[in-house]
Amino acid sequence: MALFFLLLVFAAGPCALAQPALKDVFADFKIGAALNFNQFTERDARGLPLIKKHFNTISPENVLKWQVVHPAPDRYNFEPADRYVEFGAKHGMFIVGHTLIWHNQVPAWVFQDTAGAPLSRDALLGRMREHIHTVVGRYKGRIHGWDVVNEALNENGTLRPTPWLKIIGEDYLVKAFQFAHEADPKAELYYNDYSLERGAKRDGAVTLIRRLQEAGVKIGGIGTQCHHKLESPSLEDMDASFRTFAKLGIPILVTELDVDVLPLSGPNRGADVSQTEEYRAKLNPFTAGLPEEVQNKLARRYADIFAVMMRHRKSIGRVTFWGVTDGDSWLNNFPVRGRTNYPLLFDREGKTKPAFDAVVAAARAASAK
């Protein structure tokens, strides 16, 4: 019966269902979006009504990353982050901070002394503590959850050899969580990563979380980004990850959901932002619009993804889309700049796509069981 209903949605197009607010459809977990500067400063007239109607939690794309909020040793730039937090508070949303400790978008000075030599372990720990206490402390009680450490794992599940690891050692993760808890004891603290549907990386994430738990770290959730393709990862791998993470006894957070519809430009290395590929016309086939066949394939893919998530809804605390409309998506420029991608539920005009109706139908079908 549920399958028949979904087929009716695909056949009838985007007006087949009444279009409710996503935050009302998904009563089991929060539903959110990552916002850019124009959106949380309310300059984006197209995106603003979508955000206010559909989402009850927000994440910032960039304004709380180290290079933006703390660009120089003696200077913080809080104005954009302040605007972001004010927007979330104004609209009664659960506000997420992204991200405290990462190996990307961190100025080189963070790891160096005044002569340009690598810092000592103690010096870098001090710099980490000062940054976390300053940033988290400023928004204590207003930012409700933090991505404390982002993307610390290699694809094989081992720890990525970042400057944090090389200078401080493996306990840099424990220290980051401890400092964040000191700065705001009531905030939820998360570990966040991509490609956790892959067996080796999933196992590495489980090992990492268990080590944090054994060290007495207060961890409020594991974030699985879910930057998916039309045909990967498999639904079986998604389901296995949710089942595995549920056993950790902490909420699962889908933190950066989107579905890339464009051809792979090279080896699939997940969401590693350091990878870039040269532009070729064959990698950008949908500049005039998304063909109906691909539009319906995207809708079916989203229906399948949400069907899996709804099976695990008791373990999931939040689902956040990485962007609001297709035109906002980072996937227009990753890993090839200048492409036209269609990874979200709202098109470039802010109109719902067949994928929106498919997601609503999947939620209703699961809730009716």
Image: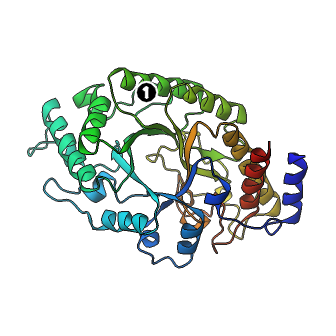
Which residue lies at the image location 73% right of the left edge and 67% below the top edge? 19
Residue 143 is left or right of residue 366, and the answer is: left
Q: Residue furthest left?
A: 115
Residue 111 coordinates in the image, percent (x, y): 20, 41
Residue 267 coordinates in the image, percent (x, y): 58, 39
Chosen colour scheme: rainbow
Which residue lies at the image location 43% right of the left edge and 37% below the top edge? 220
Q: Nearer the viewer, residue 233 or 282?
A: 233
Residue 71 is left or right of residue 229, and the answer is: left
Residue 71 versus residue 190 in the image, above or below: below
**Does any portion of residue 89 appear in the rendered image?**
yes
Which residue lies at the image location 20% right of the left edge and 41% below the top edge? 129
Residue 16 versus residue 214 in the image, above or below: below
Quadrant containing the C terminus is: top right
Q: Nearer the viewer, residue 293 or 50?
A: 50
Q: How many marks?
A: 1
Q: Amino acid at mark 1?
A: Ile
Residue 343 coordinates in the image, percent (x, y): 64, 57
Mark 1, residue position = 209
Q: Nearer the viewer, residue 109 or 195?
A: 195
